[in-house]
């Protein structure tokens, strides 16, 4: 059935091919470029100006119209303010999760529906299907690119209006389709960095909005001071690079990892060795739960979960489930469980939902 589909086009190859495939399938396709960041959006970094040029060029080749909309105010209010407050509290938020739930599938969806769209589409690597009267979010065919982890907050209404044209494709196929169609961005590098803000020197960027607060860096095993950290907001559990320690004469050489933070004392704790017991957790606590079907199907059921992106699924059970929180108990201890990140629960290929890790 032909639909009017508004496609979020970022200027990258994925969203361009998503629009192309929908046009080829006979849908009425309109591209929409979202500008969501205005601070320091200049030539020093990968600016949205170049992304817009790429999106316009792709829309021209595909033969569709492209609208530009500015969601900068919504982004600052709904995403960036929470991003900063989480870092200030010593947690490590996931801006892609916030972007998807608040901008791409809320502000964008509302705008598209106002334009008369039947559906919206994005270049995410994920799949959606209707099953027994409910909408399900599924992993992408390309497991190395699967982005369902970032989409776990979507609800029934959002999924019912969403299409993921790339869900059954591999990245190499997407680039090949783009090249064959004459899309100039077929070899464009995938975007990285903070969602909608892009690549920035992270510490310098964060220091513009939050005050630096250096403090003691201590070895967890004996509480010995071995250095100084630049501010707890700059570090995440399991971090190895950028600690500024090593080469101590009375300490055996081995990689150092961030193992914990004491916000009250402004102390950063580190340990040596990737498999140090302090970096392994048999369970975690999550809050601010969202379930795609409206609720978790079963408690005390064997599921799989990821507590960070690109992590293999780990067998687990959901325990002490209430309206706002739960415990996720793993069959095997998990490495570097990080407050502020999301734990996302799966049943085979189906993404059920998840929550924010608090401990």
Image (spheres, rainbow, N blue to C red):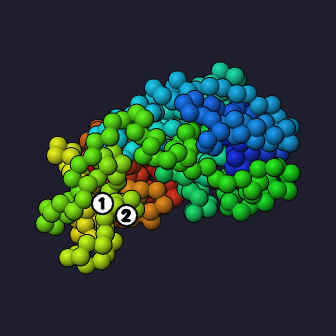
For image coordinates 25% across by 78% down, the residue present is 252
Are the two marked residues, 2 and 1, in contact with CB atoms closer than 8 angstroms?
yes
Quadrant of the rendered structure where residue 65 is? top right
Q: Quadrant of residue 64?
A: top right
Tell me if residue 281 can be seen: no
Q: Residue at x 48, y 28 (%)?
A: 76
Furthest-top residue in this view: 114
Q: From the viewer's perspective, is residue 92 above or below residue 248?
A: above
Q: Residue at x 46, y 33 (%)?
A: 79
Which one is earlier in the sequence, the residue at label 2 or at label 1?
2
Q: In this rendering, would 333 be left or right of 104?
A: left
Left or right of 249? Residue 191 is right
Which residue is identified by label 1?
A: 258
Image coordinates of residue 6 in percent, x first then y, are 70, 33
Q: Residues within 10 Å of mark 1 (few under 14, many from 20)?
A: many
Identify the image quadrant of the N terminus: top right
302 in relation to 131, above or below: below
Give the side of residue 331 with respect to residue 147, left or right. Answer: left
The percent coordinates of residue 154 (x first, y second) are: 50, 39
- The residue nearer to you, when weighing 72 against 66, is 72
Q: Residue at x 17, y 43 (%)?
A: 264
Report which residue position mark 2 lands on: 240
The local secondary structure at tag 1 comes to strand
Compare residues 324 and 178 and report the one nearer the observer. 178
Q: Position of residue 5 (x, y in %)?
A: 72, 34
Dot 2 crowding, Cα within 10 Å, few <14, some 14–19, many 20+:
some
User: Eyeballing the image, is 210 above or below 278?
Assistant: above
């Amino acid at each position: 059935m032909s639909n009017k589909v508004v496609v979020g086009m970022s200027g990258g190859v994925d969203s361009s091919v998503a629009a192309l495939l929908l046009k080829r399938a006979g849908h009425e396709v309109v591209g929409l470029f979202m500008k969501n960041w205005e601070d320091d959006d200049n030539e020093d970094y990968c600016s949205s100006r170049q992304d817009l040029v790429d999106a316009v060029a792709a829309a021209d080749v595909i033969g569709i119209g492209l609208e530009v909309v500015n969601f900068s105010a919504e982004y600052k209010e709904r995403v960036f303010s929470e991003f900063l407050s989480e870092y200030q509290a010593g947690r490590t938020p996931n801006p892609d999760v916030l972007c998807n739930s608040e901008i791409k599938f809320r502000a964008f969806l509302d705008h598209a529906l106002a334009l008369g769209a039947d559906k919206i589409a994005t270049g995410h690597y994920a799949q959606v299907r209707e099953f027994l009267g409910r909408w399900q979010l599924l992993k992408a065919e390309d497991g190395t690119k699967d982005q369902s982890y970032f989409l776990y907050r979507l609800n029934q209404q959002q999924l019912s209006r969403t299409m993921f044209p790339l869900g059954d494709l591999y990245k190499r196929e997407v680039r090949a389709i783009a090249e064959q169609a004459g899309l100039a961005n077929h070899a464009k590098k995938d975007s990285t960095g903070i969602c909608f803000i892009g690549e920035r020197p992270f510490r310098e960027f964060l220091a513009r909005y939050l005050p630096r607060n250096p403090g003691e860096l201590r070895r967890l095993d004996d509480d010995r001071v071995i250095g100084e950290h630049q501010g707890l907001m700059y570090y995440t559990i399991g971090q190895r690079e950028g600690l500024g320690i090593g080469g101590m004469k009375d300490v055996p050489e081995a990689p150092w990892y961030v193992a914990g933070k004491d916000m009250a004392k402004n102390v950063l704790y580190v340990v040596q060795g990737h498999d140090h017991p302090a970096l392994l957790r048999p369970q975690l606590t999550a809050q601010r739960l969202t379930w795609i079907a409206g609720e978790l199907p079963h408690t005390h059921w064997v599921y799989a979960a990821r507590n960070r992106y690109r992590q293999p699924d780990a067998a687990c059970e959901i325990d002490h489930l209430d309206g706002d929180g739960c415990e996720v108990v793993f069959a095997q201890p998990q490495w570097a469980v990080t407050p502020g990140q999301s734990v996302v629960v799966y049943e085979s290929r189906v993404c059920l939902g998840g929550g924010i890790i608090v401990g």
